[in-house]
Amino acid sequence: MIESFRNIFAIPDLRRRLIFTFALLAVYRLGSFIPIPGIDPVAIAEFTKAAEGTLLGFINLFSGGALGRMTVFALGIMPYISASIILQLLTVVWPYLEKLSKEGELGRRKITQYTRYGTIVLSVIQGMGISFFLERTTAPGGAFLVPEHLQGWGFRLLTVLTLTTGTAFVMWLGEQISERGIGNGISLIIFAGIVVGLPGAIINTITDMQTGALNIITVVLLVVFMIMVVAAIVYMERAQRRIPIQYAKRVVGRRVYGGQSTYLPLRLNTGGVIPVIFAASIMSFPQTLGQMIDNRWLQKITEALAWGEPMYNLVYFLSIIFFCYFYTSIIFNPEDTAENMRKYGGFIPGIRPGKRTAEFIDKILTRITLVGSVYLAVVAILPNILIAGFKVATIPFIGPTLDAFLPAWFTQGLGVKFFFGGTSLLIVVGVAMDTVNQIESQLVMRHYDGFMRRGRVRGRRG
């Protein structure tokens, strides 16, 4: 292992990419401490502390604490992710975008440009919602988050401009990391935001133990739970279904090609952590609209979709399953795979080449995606119950009766004050595995030993 780390810095190109990645992540963290002009930092700190374990605390996780401090990077990368979702949905239903997606590199660049425009539009909308929210919200002590003499359209427009510019800059940082660094830039930015919060979360847990807010048994159970979740994530992310493929012999000139047996690896979780990030981004959108529009029906919908409510958990669960299938259908096309196999003389034993092969692959992919999507949804939803419990009392008709028969830890949670477990661990472990896999590939390509001498690290897409 130590030798592998030495090899990383022995390769000039890989060393340069790593330094570049760390430098841009440092710039991102620096911007997470520059506050929006006009806010009261003391009132913001009090409000954020009171909002731990709520939807704000959940969204704050992805921005690395920037939202809780209301800094220039408060929106983080979420508008870009939302714009990507919208463009990918439109690609399926809009022929123009579908045609662009099939035009190779040129079409991809145009879609990326449209995604950037969409990011700016969503940033403006969410920035305006945040400005209204800041103006009419007070801290637990009664102080306004924005002093009354600073409120008005001047503050709102300045907030929108600041947050939109910050989001555009974060988007640029992510693209630069993907192009000139190591790993996926957008995922690494979210990864960095989560990791920097873990030391503080551990300190808070120790403090709660010392004050008696948490007992040692609860903490031990949480640690065991975290270890089990990490083990499950690693196991499931590396799981795959191997479809055997036989290649027929071909004579080209004086050489004979083919005749060997291989397999087509289908990942159990083809989409990785992207469906979880997509679902989290979508779930935050109704809250933004609820802050901007004062409508009775919209307020009821916002309350029903509040973090920790049964409807929120149900919609979040189903959204993850939907985005697993949706994202898998985008990045993997069974028809193209079957056609490529047919061109090179490959076939699945017992299955006719062409259409039958595509149907067979699609059938298997649909089944394993169901298992992978349920695994993602369960791992992501469990921490919600640990933190806030499953509020069955708010379910119409049967809620109050059911609440009386269920244990308190299930209906009220364990009182953990930070977002612990599922979603954060999914992203941290998943992104770490992908990044290590890319570094491993660079080392092996240059004839250096990787991190594992007996076999390569298998990432989700390796």
Image (cartoon, helix red, strand yellow):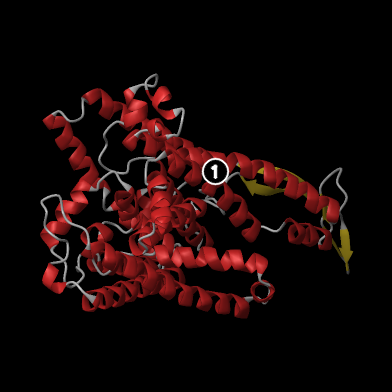
Residue 244's spot in the image, x, y percent? 75, 44
Does 43 sit left or right of 323 as displayed?
Answer: left
At 65% from the left and 42% from the top, the residue drawn is: 368
Q: Furthest residue to the front?
A: 296
Label 1, secondary structure: give it: helix
Q: In this view of the protein, which residue sits in the foreground, 345 or 107?
A: 107
Q: Is residue 246 shown to the viewer in this render?
A: no
Q: Nearer the viewer, residue 308 or 241?
A: 308
Q: Where is residue 421, by image quadrant?
A: top left
Task: Decide if residue 103 is on the left or right side of residue 73.
Answer: right
Task: Name the residue rendered at 88%, 50% in the picture.
Answer: 352
Spot occupied by residue 328 in the image (x, y as percentages of width and height): 62, 54
Q: Residue 153 lies in what quarter of the image?
A: bottom left
| Residue wearing tag 1 | 238
Front residue (pair 369, 15):
369
Quadrant of the drawing holding the C terminus: bottom right
Q: Is residue 311 visible?
A: yes
In the image, what residue occupies the spot 13% across and 57% down?
Answer: 43
Q: Quadrant of residue 405?
A: top left
Q: Nearer the viewer, residue 248 or 347?
A: 347
Q: Is residue 74 above or below residue 235?
A: below
